[in-house]
Image: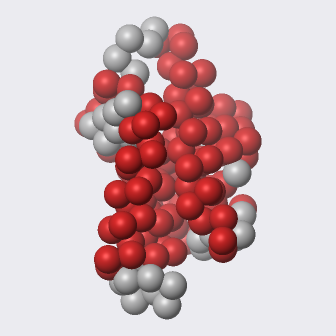
Amino acid sequence: MKEKARDYYLNKGYSCSESIIKSAIDEGLCPNELLPCATTFCGGMLSGCLCGVVAGSQIVLGYNFGRENIKGNENTAREKAKEFVEEFKKRNKFTCCRILSKDVLPENKKAHCSKIVESGAEILESMLKVRV
């Protein structure tokens, strides 16, 4: 999943959040209808705050474990959301797009963020592995 997410981000014109969801769609982890939901989550929801990788991953987790889903409920979804954020922070220290990219030169941003996309996809895939 991480290679697909990275490729969507670096080579196919998808944003970080879209790349996460598109790779999850490819793996059968969510329907194609979720992809448009991710469009507004890039660049920290266009405010520089929450990383789009985190936002996109939360959409997929909510789809798989959220309220009215036979595989989960609101508590399961919230536990998974927290688990994702904790692991993301272990690997990347922050969830804020602006801080994650703070010292990155503009010409290096795409390469820098592609590593974050890979990291998030890897975490998400490991959390959903039982469904793959």
To which quarter of the image does residue 110 belong? top right
Residue 44: where, in percent of width, then height?
34, 39
Residue 115: where, in percent of width, then height?
59, 30
Residue 93: where, in percent of width, then height?
38, 31
Question: Which residue is located at x 51 percent, y 74 percent?
Answer: 64
Question: Which residue is located at x 35 percent, y 57 percent?
Answer: 82
Question: Which residue is located at x 54 percent, y 22 percent?
Answer: 112
Report the front residue among 117 and 126.
126
> The C terminus appears in which quarter of the rendering?
bottom right
Question: Which residue is located at x 45 percent, y 45 percent?
Answer: 87
> Is residue 113 toward the left or the right of residue 47 in the image?
right
Q: Is residue 88 visible to the viewer in this orientation of the structure?
A: yes
Report the front residue among 14 and 87.
87
Q: Is residue 90 above or below residue 77?
A: above
Q: Is residue 110 above or below residue 16?
A: above
Q: Is residue 128 above or below residue 44?
A: below
Q: Is residue 52 visible to the viewer in this orientation of the structure?
A: no
- How are the residues colored? secondary structure
So how many labels did they put on this image?
A: 0
Report the front residue among 114 and 41.
114
To which quarter of the image does residue 8 belong? top right
Residue 99: where, in percent of width, then height?
31, 25
Report the front residue among 8 and 29.
29
